[in-house]
Amino acid sequence: MAVFGSIWDDIKYSFRMGNMVTRLIIINFGVFVAVSMVKLTLWMANTGHGIPEYFEDILYFFCMPAQWQTALFHPWGFFTSMFLHENFWHVVNNVIFLYLFGRIAGDLIGNRRVFPIYLLGGLVGNVLFLISDFWMAYPVPYALGASGAVMALAGAVVILAPDYRVMLLLLGQVKLKYIVLVMVLLDMVGIAQNSNSGGHIAHLGGFAMGIFFVYQLRDGKDLAVPVNRFFDRIISWFSSTKRTPAGPRRRPQPAMKATFGGAKGNRATDTNDLSFQEKLDAILDKIKQQGYENLSAEEKDFLYEASKK
């Protein structure tokens, strides 16, 4: 039991101290393990005669329904389904790409924007899955999995750094845009072959949301702000400790429009901020042209610190 206690302590520490990608991976794997344990318990209780049929009812309670009549009285499914996996390879595949795309997004536009992209992509994907039920010939009864949310991160990073190079087994270094292109093409083929078309439509919906998020960010509209504000407020409600008196507020960061080479904000007269912004712009340009792996250790450290602001 001491071993399991040590593992649990490690998981809690990683969740508390890790970045948002680490937390999302822990949540997705944790939910998968919980679902597997429920299935195993029901199988043992059924004396090894298979999984009882009501297990599907339990699972369906947290999934995204395909029928709008059911979804109307099942609104939590829009959210819970994007953390829910039943198949081992399904969760492994999603976690791998979550780590890849989430880490890049966190490095380039900040850790605080990873979860909003994930959440908004999953929600848009679920809405399109629901809409697809109206015109699909053979709709599936429900959807589950983080694929739409992960594809949102893929859409974001392919706009941010399309030439970022990723080392793949047997293939060597491959530019990010080609990896994402293959994923999008596979979803299109799945729709054309009527193979879980609703799920593939959800993936493309998440992908489109990720692209939209970045373009809005370039225009100075940060969609992450209301999402983070909402969840910060919820967390504060459940906080058991009293808040200490707040110190002076930090001045807001310059609009992301300046980060991506657009019009400069009103803070351009501040030489320190301008120097910081120019250095950040130069690093982002270098990533686009040469790839993240060609940054120096100093440049990577600078980008990591900038991502936390």
Image (spheres, rainbow, N blue to C red):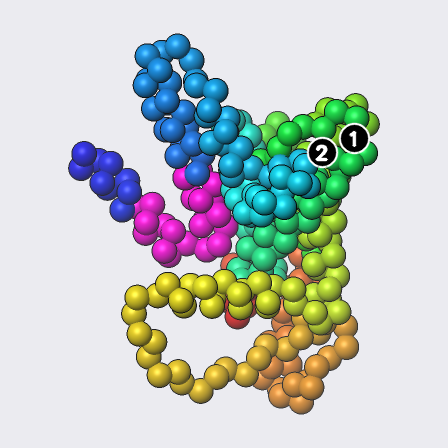
Residue at image coords 22%, 40%: 5
Q: Is residue 10 toward the left or the right of residue 134 in the image?
A: left
Whole-percent x, y for residue 145 in the image: 57, 37
Label 2's element? helix
Q: Is residue 219 above or below residue 289?
A: below
Q: Nearer the viewer, mark 1 or mark 2?
A: 1
Q: Residue most toward the left?
A: 2
Query: Which quadrant is home to the N terminus?
Result: top left
Mark 1, Cα crowd under 10 Å, few <14 / some 14-19 / many 20+, is few
Give coordinates of residue 130: x percent, y percent. 70, 40
Given contact means CB atoms under 8 Å apart, are the residues at marks 1 and 2 in contact? yes
Q: Is residue 226 magenta?
A: no
Q: Is residue 82 visible?
A: no
* Above or below for 143 versus 43: below
Name the residue located 51 percent from the left edge and 36 percent from the top edge: 61
The magenta segment: 10-30
Q: Which mark is residue 136?
A: 1
Inspect this view and state whether residue 30 appears.
yes
Q: How far apart are the two marked residues, 1 and 2, measured between alpha carbons?
A: 8 Å
Q: Nearer the viewer, residue 21 or 301?
A: 21
Question: Foreground: 198 or 137?
Answer: 137
Q: Is residue 182 left or right of residue 21?
A: right
On screen, residue 92 versus residue 254, left or right, reads left
Question: Mark 1: which secondary structure?
Answer: loop
| Vertical side of 256 occupied by 89: above or below | above
Q: Quadrant of residue 52?
A: top left
Q: Name the residue tied to disc 2.
A: 198
Q: Amino acid at mark 1?
A: Met
| Residue 137 position within the rendered picture, expressed as x and y whole percent measured from the top left | 79, 26
